[in-house]
Amino acid sequence: MEKSERRIVVIVDRDAAPAAIDKLRALQAEGYRVAKIPADGDALMRALLAGEAEELFQRADYGTYFATLPRALQDSVTRRWGAPERDPAFRESRLDCGAFAIRAVRCGNVVVALAPPCDAPPAHGTLAFYAWIADGIRAQAIVNLAAEALPDAAICAVPPLA
C-alpha cells in the first residue's frame, strides 16, 4: 500500500501536542496524506477539545470487539467498571444502542486522537478507543506520543509505525 493511502493514528496527551505538529509535518514530508495541520500544539488541543472533534464508536461494534478479548480481561473489566453504558465516554441514543465518544481530529489520512485514561484494568472507554482505531477507522499504524505506553496486542492489534 502506498504511503499516501495508509491510515495512521497519532495518539497524544496535552504535553505531546507540540510534538504531534512536528510529527504531522514529518509524515507529510515522507509522503503520507496529511491535510489541515493545526498551527501549533495549542491549536491542536483546542481542536481536540472542541465539540466537533468527537468521533463515535458504536456500542454494538464495541460488544463484538469486547467478546474477542480474553475472558479473564473481560471479567476484570466488568468487575471493576460495570456495564459499558456506565463509562463516561459513552453517549446514549434513542435511535441505536449508543456509542463511545473519541476525541480526535482528522488531518487527511492521519488522525490525531487524545489518549484515553490509563487504568488497570482498562475502562470500557479505553477499550473502545483502541477498537475504534483498529475497526472504526481501520488504521494501519499508530504513532504513540502520549506519556503512557500502548496496551498489549490483545487490546490494541494495530502496530506502531515502523
Image (cartoon, rainbow, N blue to C red):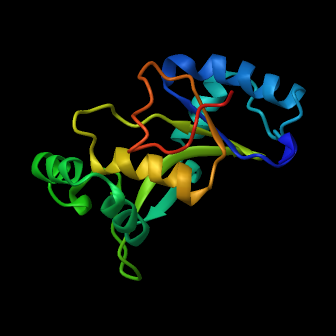
Q: Position of residue 26 (x, y in %)?
A: 81, 22
Which residue is rendered at x = 54% and y = 52% of the image? 134
Seen from the viewer's position, the closer of residues 22 and 141 is 141
Going by the image, does 55 lie left or right of 8? Answer: left
- At 45% from the left and 18% from the top, the residue drawn is 147
Which residue of the protein is positioned furthest toward the left in this rendering?
Answer: 79
x and y percentages locating residue 56 in the rendered image = 50, 60
Occupied quadrant, residue 83: bottom left
Q: Position of residue 90 (x, y in %)?
A: 33, 58
Q: Residue furthest bottom?
A: 95
Q: Is residue 140 left or right of residue 125?
A: right
- Please tell me in which quadrant of the rendered image residue 50 appears: top right
- Residue at image coords 61%, 38%: 47
* Left or right of residue 46, residue 21 in this image: right
Spot occupied by residue 94 in the image (x, y as percentages of width and height): 36, 80
Vertical placement of residue 84 versus 110, above or below: below
Please state, as top left, top right, bottom left or bottom right, where the C terminus lies in the image. Answer: top right
**Total of numbered circles in the picture?**
0
With 40 as the anchor, is 75 left or right in this view?
A: left
| The one of 54 and 70 positioned closer to us in this rendering | 70
| In front of the other: 108 or 71 | 71
- Indicate whether 32 appears above or below 20: below
Q: Residue at x 16, y 49 (%)?
A: 81
